[in-house]
Amino acid sequence: MEERAQARQKGLGYRVERTVLDEESLEEVAQRQTHEDKPALAQRLRGKLSCSAVKLRHCLFTCIPVLSWLPCYSFRECALADLFAGISVGIMHLPQGMAYALLSSLPPVFGLYSSFYPVLVYFIFGTSRHISIGTFAVMSMMVSSVTERLAPDSMFLLSPGNLTNATGIDTEARDAMRVQVATATTILAGLFQVALGLVQFGFVVTYLSDPLVRGYTTAAATIAMVSQLKYMLGVHSDRFSGPLSFVYTLIDVCFLLPETNLGTLVVSIVSLVVLAAGKELNTAWSHKLPMPIPIELITIVLATVISGQATLSPSYGVDVVGEIPSGLKPPSLPDCNLFGQVIGDAFAQAIVGYAVCISLGKTFAMKYGYKVDNNQELVALGLSNACGGLFQCFTVSCSMSRSLIQESTGGKTQVAGVISSIIVLVTVLKLGVLFQELPKTVLSAIMFINLKGMFKQYSDIVTLWRTSKIDLLVWVMTLVFTLLLNLDLGLAASIAFAMLTVIFRTQLPRYSVLGQIPGTELYLDVKTFKQAREIPGITIFRSSTTLYFANADLFLEALKKKVGIDIAQLLTYKKKLAAKEKRREKRQERRAKETKKMVDDTLSRDLERVSVGSLGKWSWDIHSIILDLSTVNFTDTMAIKTLRNICHDFREIEVDVYLAGCQPCVVEELERGLFFSKMLTKAHLFASVHDAVLHCGDHRGSPCPPHHCDRDIGCSTKL
Amino acid sequence: MEERAQARQKGLGYRVERTVLDEESLEEVAQRQTHEDKPALAQRLRGKLSCSAVKLRHCLFTCIPVLSWLPCYSFRECALADLFAGISVGIMHLPQGMAYALLSSLPPVFGLYSSFYPVLVYFIFGTSRHISIGTFAVMSMMVSSVTERLAPDSMFLLSPGNLTNATGIDTEARDAMRVQVATATTILAGLFQVALGLVQFGFVVTYLSDPLVRGYTTAAATIAMVSQLKYMLGVHSDRFSGPLSFVYTLIDVCFLLPETNLGTLVVSIVSLVVLAAGKELNTAWSHKLPMPIPIELITIVLATVISGQATLSPSYGVDVVGEIPSGLKPPSLPDCNLFGQVIGDAFAQAIVGYAVCISLGKTFAMKYGYKVDNNQELVALGLSNACGGLFQCFTVSCSMSRSLIQESTGGKTQVAGVISSIIVLVTVLKLGVLFQELPKTVLSAIMFINLKGMFKQYSDIVTLWRTSKIDLLVWVMTLVFTLLLNLDLGLAASIAFAMLTVIFRTQLPRYSVLGQIPGTELYLDVKTFKQAREIPGITIFRSSTTLYFANADLFLEALKKKVGIDIAQLLTYKKKLAAKEKRREKRQERRAKETKKMVDDTLSRDLERVSVGSLGKWSWDIHSIILDLSTVNFTDTMAIKTLRNICHDFREIEVDVYLAGCQPCVVEELERGLFFSKMLTKAHLFASVHDAVLHCGDHRGSPCPPHHCDRDIGCSTKL
């Protein structure tokens, strides 16, 4: 505001005086270069393929980033911070790993494996310094959707004579099968990621816009919550998979509500309260505590002790985790026959996992000023998954909650990740067995609390309603698609929908007739701006979007409507008149021949003009149309055809059509698309709308743009 | 050129003198209206729902167009022309109907039905006066793909003991089944069309751009030709359906080449030659002949006579049409159980049929100056199909060749269509039986000749190569998809691909740095225009496309690259410096406290500036960045976030960011998206780039845009 007042005081003026420029003159004046000086293909190739020590070194550092940063690791600056962050994150890994394994429908120990191996691989290949690779709620949900589909409980029903447990299911065989399925999916997802990274497809993540990712994760959190309700309530419900499984699960749980196990419910509520209180304390005291209270670890230790002492499992029917095997498993190759059945899921997991990683990675990179390489991240995550899969891990990504802890406790490099994985390793080797009395519902409660942030995203609806209706639509549709079609198909449908919105937006442009703001060279929408005055005899038309096949017809219709001339009807009438004239002429000719008089040759040439002039029945008061094409981003043959037709048809009724404000690349497309001809030269194309208006005014000798002298704003148009 | 020279002589000048306008002043000067005066919703609804005699009449005329034009039918002007055109088209209907029935894998008589009923329905509901509804090659191919899939030969193999014919197939049962399938598909396609028309979905056809339709019809013609090769060669090959069926058929025919029936081949070649010669004659003598020679009719009559006399069928093994039942069949309801299996095909047929009709209809409407109603056409075609389906017709559309004949022989209204259908009716009732000795290969030859126009479309490749590479890509990919995936899936894939090209084009924009053309207010790409001069201290940046989620990141990257400042690194360094300063300050404070001196409060505020000033290690010579957003069509939250980050980050290193040339609708989106804040007001948004440049120059007191006085083009910028 101050600046403006200042400008006005000083009379900061906009004064331009030049000749009117059409495209031809402009290209002459500005010396347009027809061909950019590009090096020859062979030369460019040679430049790319040439090999040098520096290049090789650079290449090596790009592929294995650890080589570039670890040698210059500053122990003085980073070691202590990383150790601290590593311990904090490692402690979070334990409960989260087990909880997310449960969510993946796998035995808890596989969650611990997934918190160990991939972290080490990422340490070597990753470029982000702050993200915490490992189990993640959304990925676990996606893993569960494939394990539940290919190894459902119903496949492992024991024969009635062989009932060894209450549920009547051969859990051992089932879990073994599920691990097979999960590892196959994980390896395939990893291979997809590596392949996409190698062909530089890191850009696919741009299709996952913020509203889409937020809608998707909200839906995933909702699905995860509903799927965990059975553990929280202690009921045995079937698991469903495929489209609509969310709805079926919800209905099933509602029906089973009366069978709630009270003991389990009490444990759930108590753990929820303890966890929520702990998290609140952590937030409130974040600046006072040297590291956050490991409330999750405390909860599971307490719960295990209480469960063991109070014999919750046998006395109250509370489900416990059960045996956790000690030690690591040797690597094993996946069952390649499964690849065909999990290919869709693997691809979806690859994309979603990458999207979460890169968005978090970029956020931290922005904050701390380093670079995260899109494609290298994809390769790194892919290798983490592929190697992890060989060691029975399920698909990993990075978890928001852990990454934030890693950053806020001062983590500076991925050394923190290595330290956290050492903690996990110790647990797997020695301490895991201690947790076998842990009630499963405590793990569900941990997951619930960790999903809190995602549930908060429901408030996006209010924000987006105010800021952008289209983004809100994408958000809501993503949620709906994902809830109804499940995580894989839902993602595909959501991306397709988000892209369709772009097409729709180009099909619903704002078409406007522009008028001059008195005393300026600016032309604005006459409906929005009161002072915008239409130039008599000239219609200036603009579409707010680019012009291409999907909206070329709409453009034409809108132009006709705004101009108010029914060009088709006029042309028919003109044709009829011309035919009539021709017949009259023929009769005259015949008569002339009879009377041996020569008919004047010029007559027929004049006819055209006469017939247009005699279209008196319809009247129109414009002599020129100016199409402001400054908003056109690109065109295609359909658009060029439409423009050519417009120019041609209006010329038939003696209305000139001019184009204005094309970008150079659009001009090139028009040239290549053979838009220009002898009748329609570059002289019909003007540098700006004002140029075109001035040309029309002068050319036609008709009312010029009015000469305003609006002293109030201290400017004038001289013509 | 003349105009230009003239303008120069006259010194047609562009002179503007006004104050610099930022968005705030512009809105004040131009009196932007914040809310358009829209009538209240209730009022609008009332307006829409109110009922009057005029409205009802209009509505009736819109729904049943025949009521509006038939009562004013001018016998004197139109009757003779329509009669003539009707007879010409009717004569074409006969051979085409039978040939296309063969292509649909149905008995020939069903092609005649399809040339009869739908025409009558279209007469009542259609709005185009010149198109000839009826059988069409592409539709027939689509019908055949569903009949061959659901009723393949292999389903009707006779048991070895019951062999009544050479092929060992129960052709009667097979054909009955195929008719069932075809009519069910037709009715469903018709219902789809009616439904789409009623919900005003006529615009879907805009997605079928010219290159797509041409590529698709070329592919369909190719598939049709290959599928007819077996009749031309007289071999018995299997028919394939589903993806890759085209490839299988081609391979199969190649393998069967040695088994060619010589008699059939001779008949094929002779008919092809006769037909081609006839067509050529028609073209050459088009202005001399009152109506085109009915060469197709002549060929089939001759062929039938010769075939009957020379006993081609029994003696030489030439396949003949066989028994053609006389009379019409009573309507029958379709087998609704089939609907589920044909739903995809029906939808594809509905869309393609409509696309062909509307594009031809619009062409004629343009030429003769009447209006074709998108949605009414959809309803009319849908009713034609639905009613036709009840009478055992297969899906119809309009045929290019017949429509052109109807127009060129002088047809003026759909009365011509009724007359043509009377001719078909007479044939069905009385003359059909005469054709039973007609060799099938003659029908194939007729089809071949009629597809000639579509094969010519292969030359599009050359044209499009020169005019638009993207459209060429769409054309080629449509051809490939359709050939490989067949007509239904191929269409879906092609449309998806065409839409993706739009997304890709917005992701591959041309990013440019703009420079001033001396003496003007125009700013052009410095790489393309030699005379464009960058303003010292100011970088003007433009993307050639709109800014939204899929290219917001690319925009940011390109801007950083063009500006040449590694903003992330700078910010980190600045943060480090700031932290250092803070530590120093704390030390000072502590010391100050110790010495009981008060620290000046202003110190800490000055620090920020000091720390930026001391970034001497990196140097940059710009003080302002201007983003030219005149090409932005629409934005979303991602784009706004990116823009906000750009403004914020560059301000941190004391580079001002200004926006210029936003459309009013983009400004509204920025407002709604909470882009503007206290720090980032509308005063940062300028009406044009030149305004922004002038503001920067004045505001910074640094080098202004150079003052050029290029007398050669007679213009000057006064500042």
Image (cartoon, coloured by chain):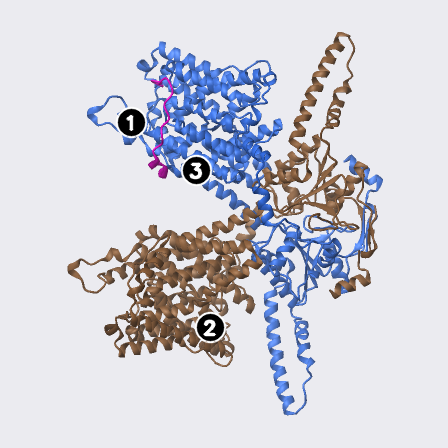
Chain colours: A blue, B brown
**Total numbered labels:** 3
| A365 sits to left or right of B484 | right
Dot 1 corresponds to which residue?
A: A173
- Is disc 3 placed on a helix, strand or loop? helix
Residue nearer the viewer, B298 or B576: B576
C-alpha distance separating marks 1 and 3: 27 Å
| A158 sits to left or right of A620 | left
Range drawn in magenta: A321-341
Q: Amino acid at mark 2?
A: Ile
Per the image, is A445 magenta? no
- Is disc 2 placed on a helix, strand or loop? helix
Residue B551 image point, x, y percent:
58, 41
| B558 sits to left or right of A319 | right
Task: Tell which subunit mark 3 falls on.
Answer: A
Q: Amino acid at mark 1?
A: Ala
Q: Amino acid at mark 3?
A: Phe
Quadrant including the N terminus of chain A: top right
Dot 2 corresponds to which residue?
A: B405
The answer to whether the residue labelled 2 contacts the one labelled 1, judged by CB atoms less than 8 Å apart, is no
